[in-house]
Amino acid sequence: MTEQLPIIVILGPLLAAILSAFAAWFRPKWSHPLVVLGLAVSCAAALKLVFIVAGEGAQNYWLGGWGNQAHDYVVGIQITVDSLNTLLLAAVSGIALLTALYAKRLVDAELAGRQRYFYALFSLLVTGLLGIGITGDIFNLYVFMEIAALSSYVLIACGKGRAYMAAFNYLIMGTMGACLYLLGVGFIFVKTGTLNIDDVSTLLPALGQAQALFVGFVLILLGAWAKMAFFPFHGWLPNAYAHAPTASAAVLAPLATKVAVYAMLRIMVTVYSIDYILDSPGIQSVVLLLSSIAIVVGSFFSLTQTNLKLIACYFVVSEIGYMVGGAWLANGPGLTGAMYHVVADAAMTSALFMAVGCIVYRLGQAQLNDLQGAFFKMPVTMAAFVVTMAALIGVPPTCGFFSKWYLIQGAAQAGVWHFVAALLLSSLVKAIILFRIVEIGYNRVPHPAVEGNPAIPRNEAPLSMLIPTVAMALGLIALGLATSPLVNTIISKALPDGLAP
Amino acid sequence: MMPSLPIWQFDLPLLVLVVLFAVVALSIRNLMGAAIVFGAYSFMMCLIWAGMGAVDVAFTEAAVGAGVSTVFIVSTIYNTSATMKRRPGGMAFKLFIGVVVTVAGGFLLSALPDFPDWGDPNSPVNATVAPYYITHSIPDTHVPNLVTSVLADYRGFDTLLETVVVFIACIGIYSILRIEPARTSIDETDEEIAAPASYDPTDSLIVRQASRFMVPFMQLFALYVIAHGHYSPGGGFQGGVILGASLILLAVSFDLKFLLSRWREKSLMLLVATGVGLYAAVGLACLFMGGNFLDYGTLDAVLPGKQDMARSHGILLVEIGVGITVMFSMLAIHINLASNGRLERGL
Amino acid sequence: MENLIANFNYVIVVILMMIGLWSMLAQKNLIKKCIGMAIFQTGIILFFISIGAKRGAKVPILTGDEAPVVEQLANPLTQILMLTAIVVGVATLGMALALAQKIYRQHASFDEDEILENQRK
C-alpha cells in the first residue's frame, strides 16, 4: 500500500473537489466536510512520505504503470517524492487542511450566496499546488500550474469591487508566466526529446552550453518569476491578494508563491545543475541584485501602507527575494536556507494571514487605525500575531531565525554583502511595523486594568478560526525547534553533491 | 541537395498570412471584426498544422480555437460593446513594451542556429521517446491512432488534468458570472447594464429551420468522432466540443429559454462533474484492481479481452468521460457568457 | 541565412509571440489583451508542432497490418502535448472573457485606463 502513497497525496483533494461539486447541488452543507476529509487524507499520506523518504530515499511512481521498464526512457508520466519536495508537500497539505478548517466562518460571512463552488475550487487549487510539487515531468508541471492558476483566478474574483480587475491582471500575468515556462520546456525538449525530469537531467550534461538550453533556462526562470511575483513582476500580487476574499488570500498567499519558488529550485537543482549556474556568473550576480531589490522594494512599500492586508502582501513580495536570492547564492548554506525558508515562509505567511483574517472578521476591516485596543479585544489573536511577526523578524527560536541564519551565512560565504544588508533591513522594517501596531493596539487606549478607565469588552474571534491560528503560530516555534533534525535528515540530502556539509 | 526547403511548399504563404491575420486582428478597432479575423487566423493555423501531419491538433483547433473561442468572444461582445474608444497618449509606454518585446524576440532567435532542421526525422524530439509510441502502440493498447493511445493511456494523467482544467473553467465562470435569481440584493458595486433589446434572435425562420435540420447530423457526427477516435482523428475533446457546439447552435438560433427548457442548469452542471468523475473513477478502479492509477491493463478482469484490449476499452471509457465534461462545460460557459450570468436571454 | 530559411517556422513563431506578448502588455483594451493572449498561445503551439514535424511523414494513424516504420509517421508526442495546450488555452480565454464581462458590468468600459480612473474615485 505504501507504494501508492504518492498518488494518494494528489487524489485526496482532487476526488474531494469532484464530490464537492456534486454535493454543491444536493447537500451544500457537505461540500466543506468532504474537502476537509480529502485534505486530511492527503496530509496523512504526505506526512507518512516524509518518514519514508527520510528512511529509504526517493519514491517514484509511474502513472498507468508506464515506467522505464520497457524503454531506455520513461514513456509515461512519473511522480516523485524525494528529499527536495517531501517537506513542501507535507507543508502544503497541512497548511491547506488548517486553512480549510479556518475558512468556514469567513466564507459564510463574506461570500454568502456565492459559495456554491468555493470549496471545490479551494480543493482544486490545492490539487494543483501539490501536483506542481510532486510531479516528475516538466510538461505535467505546466498542466498542474494551470490548474492552480485557473482556480486561484476564481478564488480571487470571488471578492468584490476591485477584485475583478486585480484577477484579470493576475490572469494576464499568470498566463504569460505559464506560456514562457511552456516555451522554455519546448527549448529543453528540442535538445533532449524527453520530458521526464530524471531523463532530462541525465541527458543535459552531455549537451554542454548549447544556446537553446540557455534560452530555455532563462524562459523557465522568467515564467516562474512571473508566477511567484519576483521583482520586477511583483505588480499583480498586492492588488490580487488584498482584494481577494480573506479566506482565499489565507490559502493563496502562503502556498501559491512558495510552490513557484519550489518549481524554480527543482529546475535549477535537478534539471539543470548548480554547476550550470556557476558557469554563467553574469546572470548569477544580476539575479542576486534583483533579489536584494525585491527585498528592499517589498519592505519599503510595506512601510508606506496603512492597511494590514496590504502590509502582509508586501511582506510576501520581500520574502520571495529571500528565497530566490538564497537559491542563487548557489552554495551549501544559501541553498539550505532557501529550501528551508520555502517551508518556513509558507508557515509564517499562513499564520500571518490567519491572524489578519481573524482581525478582519471581528473588526470588519484592517486599517491600522482601526486596531486601537485590539490587544484587549482579541488578546489570543494578537498574541499569535506577535509570535508570527517575531518569526518574520527572525527572533529565535522561531523558524524565521534559522532560515535567516542560513541565508546570511550563505551570503557572507559568497561575499554578497548587499544581500546581507537587504536581509537585515527587512528585519528592521518588520520590527518597526510590529512596534507601530503594538503602539496603536496597546498604548493608544487607556489601559482597562487601571482603575477608572473604561473597560474594553472581549471580542475574540470564533474558536473555529482561533484554534487553527494559534496552532499555526505554535507551529512556527515547533518548526524552529525541529530545524536541525529536518536539515540533517532531509534538506542536506537534497543539496547537490559537493555542496552538502 | 536542397535541405533548406520546407517540407510543404504551401506552408510559406500560409505562415505569412497567419502573421498578417494576427496583426489585423489586433489593430482593427471594431471588436466584432477583431473576433472574426481571429477566427480566420485560427482556421489558417489549422491548415498549417494539418500540413505538418498533426491532424488531431488541427481538428481540435478547428473546433476549439476557431469555433468555440470565437463564439465566446462574440457572445461577450454582444453583451457589452464592440467599439473601442480612441484615447490619446500612452505612446511612450507602447514603444517601451515594443522595445522589450523585440529584445526578447532577438534573444529567442539567438538559439536558432542550435535547432535541428525543420522536418529532420532524426532530431532528438523525433528519436528519443517518440519511436516507442509508434512501435508499441498496437501491442500495448491495440489502438491504431497513436495520438489517441498516447493521449489517453501513456500520458493519460495529463489528459485527466486537462479535463479538470475544463471543469475548473466551467465552475469558475459559473462562480464569477452567474447571478442566481433567488439572490435579492446584488452586489451594490455591480452597475446594472440592460441587455441590448434591439435584436431579437427568435425572429429568423430560416436560421431556425436550418439549425433544426443540422443539429441531429452534428450530434451524430460528434458521436462518431468520439467512438471512432481509436481508428481515425478525433476523440473525446473534439467530439465533446462538436456536441457542445450543436447545443450552442440551438441556443443561438432559438433562444436560451428554449434550450434551458430541455437542459436544466442543474443537470448541466452535474453532468460536467460526472464526466471528470467517470475519468477519475476508471483510474481509481485500476488502483483497486491492484495496479497503478490509470493502469487500464489491470481492468482485464472485468472488461472483455486480454490486457491490450482492456487498455483499448479503458481508453474508450475515459474518452466518453472527457466528451461529457467538454460538451456540457462548453455549453455552460456559453450560456453564462451570452446572458451575462442571468440565463434569461442572450445571444 | 540558409539556416534562417530552413527554420522559417521558428522565425514566424517568434514573430507571433512578439505580437501576442506586446498586445497582452501594451494594449489597453481588455478584449484585445485576450486576443493577444490567444495569439501568444497559438505561437507556442506552432513551435511544438514544428519541432515534431518530419519530412515526408504521414499522419500518425496506423493502417493495415504491416509493422510501422518510425520515419514514415509523424511524431504523436508533440501533438498530444499541444492538444492539452489548446484546451488549456480555451479555458483561460473563457475565464478572461468572463472577468472582462464582469468588469464591464462595473465600469461600462473595456479601457484599462478608464477603469483605473474609475477605481481611484
Image (cartoon, coloured by chain):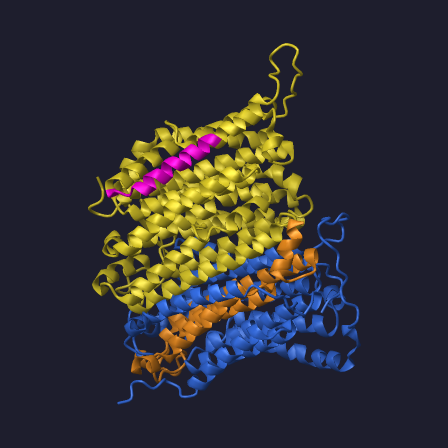
Instruction: For chain B, give the colour.
Output: blue
Q: In the rendered view, tell whether residue A452 sits above or below residue A365.
A: above
Q: Is residue B292 left or right of residue B21?
A: left
The span picked out in magenta is A414-432
Predominant SS of the magenta segment: helix
Q: Residue at x 29, y 61 (%)?
A: A200
- From the viewer's side, name the closer residue of B308 and A50: A50
Colour in which the image shows chain C: orange
**Palette colour of chain A:** yellow
Q: Is residue A339 left or right of residue A470?
A: left
Q: Position of residue B59 (x, y in %)?
A: 51, 76
Image location of residue A489, percent across then percent down: 28, 37
When asked about the image quadrant of residue B33, the answer is bottom right
**At 58% across and 70% down in the image, what residue appears?**
B69
Q: Judge whether residue B289 can be spotted in this image.
A: no
Image coordinates for residue A233, horizontal then vertical, percent:
46, 53
Does the magenta-highlighted stretch encompass residue B150? no
Q: Quadrant of residue A217?
A: bottom left
Image coordinates of residue A123 in percent, x first then y, are 53, 47
Is residue A151 depicted above or below C59 in this figure? above
